[in-house]
Image (cartoon, rainbow, N blue to C red):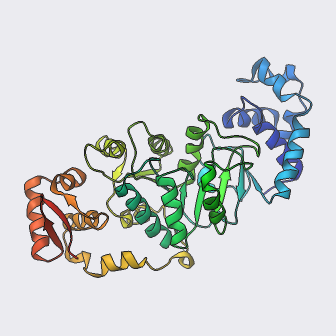
Amino acid sequence: MSIINDVEIIHLLALQNINGIGPYTARNLIAYCGSVEAIFQKKASELEKIPSIGFKLARLVTQKNNLEKSEKEYRLLQSLGITVHPYFAETYPNFLKNIPDAPILLYQKGPLNLNTRPSIAIVGTRKPTEYGKKQASFFAEYLASQGINIVSGLAYGIDSFAHMSTLKANGTTTAVLAHGFSTIYPASHKSLAEQILGKGALITEYSYHKKPKPMLFPERNRIIAGLCVATIVVEAAVSGGALITAKLANDYNREVYAIPGNLGIKTSEGCNQLIRKNLARILTHPQEVIDDLEINGLLQIPASTIKSPSAQEAANTSKINLNELSLEEQKIYRFLASCENAHIDTLHEALNLPIAHLATLLLNLEFLEIVESLPGKKYRIKK
């Protein structure tokens, strides 16, 4: 591997900071000119002849103060302990490197090496229900306890519950920011961001002083999707940002899962639609993600990172040997184990089982004293 020097990083930083030059154009310029340094040695008249560059961009690239400003920024980043990962460096996240629009530079605070363990994204609405909060917390804690890095966007709602529950499980979590490191948005999550830095990471593609803007959040979501072997959507409206992340993950040929929700609830519509349109696999228990990814050879967790399940999860699973149940009964059990109770119609919709057959399965689980029925055709795990 070639040695990466400061001059090369400063030139990459200057290129990424030019308005109108995204990942595709940056790579195009480097390919045509032979190196990133060579780009800034060209005249504007030479650059504008390169496909997709043109008159305006060529003159932005050749502005005299580009490199000077970038060198000052780079020295600032170094003084603040912010690591810069060029896209061709070994430290650049491998999964992110494989997407076509990966940033040419990634900035990181925090000690986590993103290539030492698999990452799974947990995303969802900023206004979750109690059900959504519970599921985000349960899934994050369980997966983190198995050595998986949990990735989200540090936003209100599902994101914050995913990060906090990972920290509670003493796991590692990564927050992908839609702005530079000069600020934390939302400001109320500064304390959470500091906790993440204990053993996790904050990452961004944006220069240090870049402020959060609405259009940057959907752009940021491609990094969340690209960084991870799988994306889990917990709760989301049909027009929610989490569905953008799910679409991007599908575009990158990554696994997408959705946790089903109650009918008639706005924050469940996005997840239910993903499942109905076969854009996401239905998910009723976090172990299903691990099993799927291991079968497909996508999940390689170092043994040293695997921890015992949380006390809550151990209590839930110690009551019963799931291997004694049919696959359909296992799905019912796992769904009910992830919530306080569920109506038979919710189970029917979530598990795609005919009502008559579902009722028979539930009755059998009642006979086994695994499930108990509640008034109003609701069911829960027997306590």
* Above or below for 326 versus 355: below
**Residue 43 vs residue 206: left or right?**
right
- Please tell me which residue lies in front, 23 or 296: 23
Q: Position of residue 254 (x, y in %)?
A: 47, 50
Answer whether residue 147 is visible to the viewer in this image: no
Q: Residue at x 69, y 34 (%)?
A: 22
Could you tell me which quadrant the N terminus lies in?
Answer: bottom right
The quadrant in which residue 130 appears is bottom left
Q: Position of residue 233 (x, y in %)?
A: 42, 51
* Above or below for 58 versus 3: above
**Residue 195 vs residue 72: left or right?**
left
- Please tell me which residue lies in front, 34 or 310: 310
Q: Residue at x 26, y 81 (%)?
A: 319
Could you tell me which quadrant the C terminus lies in?
Answer: bottom left
Residue furthest out toward the front: 188
The quadrant in which residue 221 appears is top right
Q: Position of residue 43 (x, y in %)?
A: 89, 24
Q: Position of residue 293 (x, y in %)?
A: 43, 61
Q: Residue at x 24, y 76 (%)?
A: 323
Number of disc labels: 0
- Please tell me which residue lies in front, 121 or 168: 168
